[in-house]
Amino acid sequence: MLTACATEEPTRLPDDTEFEVVDMSGNWEKDFQQSDDFETEFNLYMFDIQRRIAPQQDGINRGVGGGGLSGSMETIVGLARFTEEITRMPILQIEQDRSRVKIDREDDFALFCEFFNQQNMVTETPFGSEQCGWNGEQLLFLLNLNDGLRIYYQVTLSPNGSQLNITTTVSSDQVSTGMTISNYY
């Protein structure tokens, strides 16, 4: 049940690929039955945080150092609610050719990736850095923002091309445990 909480976050994207890019273009509508329910995932996330805090509090009461959990409850809840906000898009429009892909997300910023010779692209912005590229048949985006916030998107098309999955992990320097939400379209 806590698989989403145990998902390890990548520190960087793979360097190179040797395959034909997967065509994800089209209009996609969210499948709410298969996608993660945010409230359920939020409750599991908070349960995991509280489970990690309990031994630390016991250790503190006995004079033993804590186990490395960081972040105030306000910061933890803020990270979770931000994750909810950036994963709620019910409709996506993907435009793609052999060297670029643009994922327009309703009521949110577009994800854009240019890939030359199938190498990862790194873009510096006033807000931080953005990396994108292919890892096998998955399109990956990693946004490292200046304030220590990281957003990782993993976009996968089903083998028959009928379903798209976007798994989003949001983490922060202020919170030791990131939150992951998986949506199907």
Image: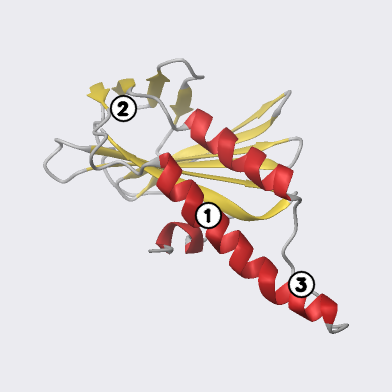
In the displayed structure, 52 sits above or below 151; it is: below
Quadrant of residue 61 in the image?
bottom right
Q: Residue furthest left?
A: 160
In front: mark 2 or mark 3?
Answer: 3
- Could you tell me which residue is drawn at 11 percent across and 42 percent down? 160
- Dot 3 corresponds to which residue? 57
Tell me, yes or no, whether the two marked residues, 3 and 1, touch with CB atoms within 8 Å.
Answer: no
- Dot 2 corresponds to which residue? 98
Question: What is the three-letter code of the residue carrying label 1?
Answer: Tyr
As measured in the structure, the alpha-carbon distance from the residue carrying label 3 to the one carrying label 1 is 18 Å
Q: Residues within 10 Å of mark 1 (few under 14, many from 20)?
A: many
Q: Closest to the observer: 104 or 180?
A: 180
Q: Closest to the observer: 1 or 4?
A: 1
As measured in the structure, the alpha-carbon distance from the residue carrying label 2 to the one carrying label 1 is 38 Å
- Could you tell me which residue is drawn at 45 percent across and 27 percent down? 114
Question: What is the three-letter code of the residue carrying label 3?
Answer: Gln
Question: What is the three-letter code of the residue carrying label 2?
Answer: Arg
- Dot 1 corresponds to which residue? 45
